[in-house]
Amino acid sequence: QPQHHQKTSNRRRHTNMKFLHALPIAIGFSIHSAAAIGVDEQPHQPQQQQQALSSPTRLGEMHKSRSKKDKDCRKYLEEFPQWREEVGYWIGDLTFYGSEGAPFESANWNYPYNNYTGFITGNISGGSYRQRNVFLYPPQTEEACQEDGSVAGNGTCGTNGNSKLFEADQSISPDVRSCDGTIEGPFAGIFDTKTTLVGEDNALLYQVFYQGATFQSQLTTLSGNGRRTRSAHGYNPFGPTPEVPTYCSFYRERRVEREEFYAALETTLDEYDILDADACTRDSNGNLVDGIVGGFDACEAHLEESFEGMFD
């Protein structure tokens, strides 16, 4: 029988661990940033994406022309209400839908997508934004386990849940400031990304493009009293119908104090019966991350990266 994770008194034993570090790409995002900001799983064909790596792109085109007004405008992200609101500890009730409007079903991650939990940290520094996510998935239903009993890691289908790590770093040069709070740059070597402040100082629009075609469009609405709603729509620019949506996320999140945040994280690990070996040891694709000793401490170390050594 698999060994279940230790309870609160023993969960904080692991202090020397190698955890997932940020992988910023020049001016823009880490390789998993689209997932971290609004997408849990991207159901696109790897072969098509690989072929696109050799295609000409629009990288950098959005940065070629800046007016004198833009150059003279000197504002850091903390000067904008939306970016200030993004800072802190967030707990989310998450749902992820497939192209037909039903909760997404993954071929390689046999856990429910209709109701799972996200723990998100965010921070800004100068012209940079950093986000770290831990998504916790409850055990699969008994009915689904009868059809497919597979699991990732050491648990048992229908008994143990699992977790994934996500990360995103979006940044302009430390010496450059934004006129209107917009940040833009390349993602994964082939995409253009742009985050724009919209609404009445209460929303952010994050979009990813491939040669002008929409890959992802996410709206974050800051509704007040430490609440925000994030919804991302995904598209497949590599396929025959790039205009047809392939997924939609619906994240309902609330900002809390640090102590409440980590107490809820610990409670959810217990509630979902996630083994220590499966707690914060897998990346956004469900692959094991080298050097991580699983458990509560691994989750905390990943989440605290948002506040430690901002873009050194």
Image (spheres, helix red, strand yellow):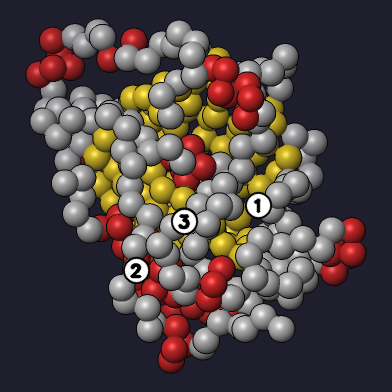
Q: Amino acid at mark 3?
A: Val
Q: Nearer the viewer, residue 104 or 47?
A: 47
Q: Is residue 75 visible?
A: no
The quarter of the picture where residue 214 lies is top right
Q: Rounded to the nearest whole Å, what is the CA distance between mark 1 and mark 2? A: 31 Å
Query: In screen coordinates, is 184 left or right of 233?
Result: left
Q: Amino acid at mark 1?
A: Thr
Residue that carries the numbered disc 1 in the rendered image: 95
Q: Residue 79: x percent and y percent?
A: 19, 40
Query: In screen coordinates, is 254 left or right of 147?
Result: left
Neighbour tally class for label 3: few under 14, some 14-19, many 20 plus, Cα within 10 Å: some
Q: Split into 4 quadrants, where in the image is the N terminus?
A: bottom right
Q: Residue 301: x percent and y percent?
A: 34, 66
Q: Nearer the viewer, residue 32 or 81?
A: 32
Say if 262 sits above or below 165 in the image.
below
The earlier-in-sequence mark between 1 and 2 is 2
Q: Rounded to the nearest whole Å, what is the CA distance between mark 1 and mark 3? A: 25 Å
Checking the image for residue 289, the label placed there is 3
Q: Is residue 7 visible?
A: yes
Q: Residue furthest bottom?
A: 9
The earlier-in-sequence mark between 1 and 3 is 1
Determine whether the residue tagged by mark 2 lies in a helix, strand or loop.
loop
Q: Are marks 1 and 2 in contact (CB under 8 Å)?
A: no
Q: Residue 22: x percent and y percent?
A: 33, 47
Q: Nearer the viewer, mark 1 or mark 2?
A: 2
